[in-house]
């Protein structure tokens, strides 16, 4: 029996997060950028760009995946272990490569690109190993890093993307309310986190009955565990007076949204209340600055001044906000749209960005813990639209 290096296995009905017209528009924008850069074929390897341009969100499990875009073709490259699922969940063509022979992945890509062409690649994702294989199999005339230009394209959301992001923000609120109900002294972080995650997954299934469900999660932190924004969940039991950090993250077809809130169990001491109220003040001030024409660096400088005036700037731990879209805690990042000193991007209508100031006071100091509020805002023609509904601040979030 002669076994193939790659083949097409297409079966079942195609179900995608967006209409075909949405992907066609994205590919049209990409091809215009390719033409400007002289790129003849793009070989995408990242989860975020493959999902953005095709709808397919892969699960690597140690195997490479790809999307090849030329002037006329858009072809996902997937492993045989997934059978026809990648084709059902992608826009355009799909080729399945086999693992009977090493590097059939690159032979499948070669069947679309040919040799001697100008190849676009993702410099922030392609590994050294795979970069060498690209050169060996495709023998490109030259290579162009297309990661920066694709990031710029992803930063500007379509109407369809804004719809799914709004749904995600509403789902994050659902998780927040479920967590609020579960908070009580003696409860474990893990049990409270599961309550929020379960509520969000059920909400996503209700809103999107034909979707694939994956990657929704919660980070619920208490006490000293609140000192970092991305600290994992533990089995720590809550105590009266604990500071809490509520973080819900629903994932809908690769689209990330978030809700983050400071909370306390039953009571909050005066020192903690002072820090909390200052952070809420920065949060509200920061949201007022999110307008078209403002640069990320300028906004950051103004919030820095707000904290410095209150002698709190030394407790700030990271940037004040970031973009939303096809990203997650383990893939994707639109680093050109973050509220940091070194980002000069100017806000434009259709961008989506968070406001999330955080102050961390060291353990043993008055008001110890991490304080963070987080809302998602869509930049409009004359300001912003806040799509987060769960309340922030002491009046609503001293619970249990």
Image: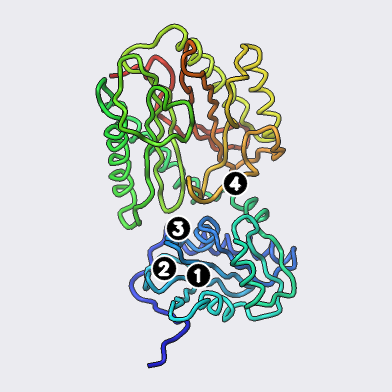
Q: Between marks 1 and 3, how big is the CA–CA gap?
A: 17 Å
Q: Secondary structure at mark 1?
A: strand
Q: Secondary structure at mark 2?
A: helix
Q: Residues within 10 Å of mark 2 (few under 14, many from 20)?
A: many
Q: Which residue is mark 1?
A: 76
Residue 4 appears left or right of 324: left
Residue 209 appears left or right of 30: left
Cβ–Cβ below 8 Å for labels 3 and 2? Answer: no
Query: What residue is drawn where x is 28% and y is 19%?
Result: 400
> In the depicted view, which residue is nearer to us: 339 or 60?
60
Q: Between marks 3 and 2, how big is the CA–CA gap?
A: 15 Å
Name which of mark 4 and mark 3 comes first in the sequence.
3
Name which of mark 1 and mark 2 comes first in the sequence.
1
Q: Between marks 1 and 2, how big is the CA–CA gap?
A: 8 Å
Q: Between marks 1 and 4, how big is the CA–CA gap?
A: 22 Å
Count of numbered tags: 4
Query: What residue is drawn where x is 54% and y is 17%?
Result: 281
Cβ–Cβ below 8 Å for labels 1 and 3? Answer: no
Q: Which residue is mark 4?
A: 334
158 up-or-down from 112: above or below: above
Name which of mark 4 and mark 2 comes first in the sequence.
2
Q: Between marks 4 and 2, how big is the CA–CA gap?
A: 25 Å
Q: Which mark is residue 86?
A: 2
Q: Residues within 10 Å of mark 3 (few under 14, many from 20)?
A: some
Closer to us: mark 4 or mark 3? 4
Q: Position of residue 299 (x, y in %)?
A: 66, 28
Cβ–Cβ below 8 Å for labels 1 and 2? Answer: yes
Q: Secondary structure at mark 4?
A: loop
Query: What residue is drawn where x is 48% and y is 16%?
Result: 276
Q: Which residue is mark 3?
A: 18
């Amino acid at each position: 029996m002669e076994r193939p290096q790659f083949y097409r296995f297409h079966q079942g009905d195609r179900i995608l997060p967006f209409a075909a017209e949405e992907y066609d528009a994205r590919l049209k924008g990409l091809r215009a950028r390719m033409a400007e850069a002289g790129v003849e074929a793009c070989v995408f390897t990242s989860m975020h760009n493959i999902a953005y341009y095709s709808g397919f969100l892969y699960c690597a499990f140690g195997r490479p995946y790809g999307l090849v875009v030329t002037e006329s073709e858009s072809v996902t490259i997937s492993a045989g272990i997934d059978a026809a699922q990648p084709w059902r969940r992608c826009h355009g063509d799909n080729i399945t490569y086999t693992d009977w022979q090493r590097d059939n992945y690159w032979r499948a890509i070669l069947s679309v690109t040919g040799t001697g062409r100008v190849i676009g690649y993702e410099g922030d994702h392609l590994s050294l190993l795979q970069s060498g294989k690209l050169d060996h199999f495709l023998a490109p005339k030259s290579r162009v890093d297309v990661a920066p230009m694709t990031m710029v394209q992803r930063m500007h959301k379509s109407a369809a993307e804004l719809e799914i992001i709004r749904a995600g923000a509403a789902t994050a609120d659902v998780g927040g309310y479920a967590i609020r109900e579960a908070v009580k002294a003696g409860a474990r972080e893990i049990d409270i986190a599961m309550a929020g995650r379960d509520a969000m997954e059920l909400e996503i299934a209700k809103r999107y009955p034909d979707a694939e469900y994956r990657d929704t999660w919660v980070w619920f932190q208490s006490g000293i565990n609140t000192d970092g924004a991305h600290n994992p969940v533990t089995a720590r039991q809550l105590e009266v007076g604990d500071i809490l950090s509520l973080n819900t993250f629903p994932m809908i077809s690769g689209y990330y949204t978030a809700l983050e809130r400071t909370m306390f169990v039953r009571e909050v001491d005066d020192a903690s209340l002072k820090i909390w109220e200052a952070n809420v003040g920065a949060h509200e001030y920061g949201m007022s600055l999110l307008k078209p024409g403002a640069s990320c660096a300028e906004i950051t400088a103004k919030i820095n001044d707000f904290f410095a005036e209150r002698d709190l700037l030394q407790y700030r731990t990271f940037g004040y906000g970031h973009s939303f879209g096809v990203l997650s805690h383990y893939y994707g990042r639109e680093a050109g749209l973050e509220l940091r000193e070194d980002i000069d991007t100017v806000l434009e209508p259709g961008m989506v960005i968070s406001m999330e100031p955080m102050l961390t006071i060291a353990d043993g100091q008055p008001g110890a813990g991490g304080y963070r509020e987080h809302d998602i805002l869509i930049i409009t023609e004359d300001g912003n639209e806040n799509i987060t509904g769960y309340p922030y601040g002491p009046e609503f979030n001293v619970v249990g």
